[in-house]
Image: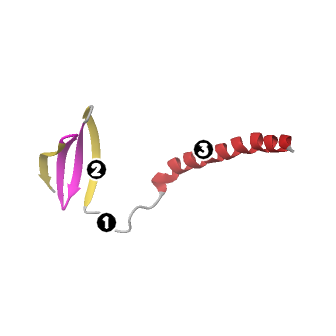
Amino acid sequence: MMWSYVLKLVILLPLVCGLLIACLYAWRKLEGRLPRGAGERMVQVKETMMVSPGVRLAVVDFEGRRLLVSVARGGVTLVDRLEA
């Protein structure tokens, strides 16, 4: 009786763990193909670039303007603005 329980545990536990890992891998690969929100967003982040550890530059489109902002731990700073 005890051996059948141990045998089932040895077989089913790796099977369940393998299925969990496969599902997480598939979710990560297919997440980009999922549809986003229904409407057009007012703010869109076009591109980001890491300048140094903790500091990142981001290009943001907002109401027909393109903004270059610096994002750091201390906050967000407007670097430059371009009218479209």
Residue in view at x 56 percent, y 45 percent: 25
Badge 2 marks a residue whose secondary structure is strand
Q: Nearer the viewer, residue 29 or 71?
A: 71
Instruction: Please check the rendered image and state whether residue 57 is part of the magenta-colored stretch, yes or no.
Output: yes
Residue carrying label 3: 21
**Which residues, given as a range, are shown in magenta?**
55-74
Amino acid carrying label 2: it is Lys
Neighbourhood count class around disc 1 (C-alpha, 10 Å): few under 14, some 14–19, many 20 upward: few
User: Residue tagged by mark 1?
Assistant: 40
Callout 2: few (<14), some (14-19), or many (20+) C-alpha neighbours within 10 Å?
few
Which of 74/47 is in front?
74
Camera-side residue of 29 and 1? 1
Q: Residue drawn 38% across and 68% down?
A: 38
Instruction: Compute the Cα span from label 1 to label 3.
Output: 34 Å
Q: Residue at x 18, y 62 (%)?
A: 63
In this picture, residue 76 sits left or right of residue 18: left
Determine whether the residue tagged by mark 3 lies in a helix, strand or loop: helix
Query: Which label's residue is closer to the chain start, 2 or 3?
Result: 3
User: First in sequence: mark 1 or mark 3?
Assistant: 3
Residue designated by label 2: 46
Between the C-alphas of marks 2 and 3, the distance is: 32 Å
Type of amino acid at the residue the image marks with label 1: Glu
Q: Total of numbered circles in the picture?
A: 3
- The first of marks 2 and 1 along the sequence is 1
Q: x and y percent of residue 30 in the render? A: 52, 52
Is label 1 or label 3 in front? Answer: 3
Tell me the kind of residue under disc 3: Ile
Q: Quick check: marks 1 and 3 in contact, CB under 8 Å?
A: no
Q: Quadrant of the C terminus?
A: bottom left
Question: Residue 77: where, in percent of width, then height?
Answer: 14, 45
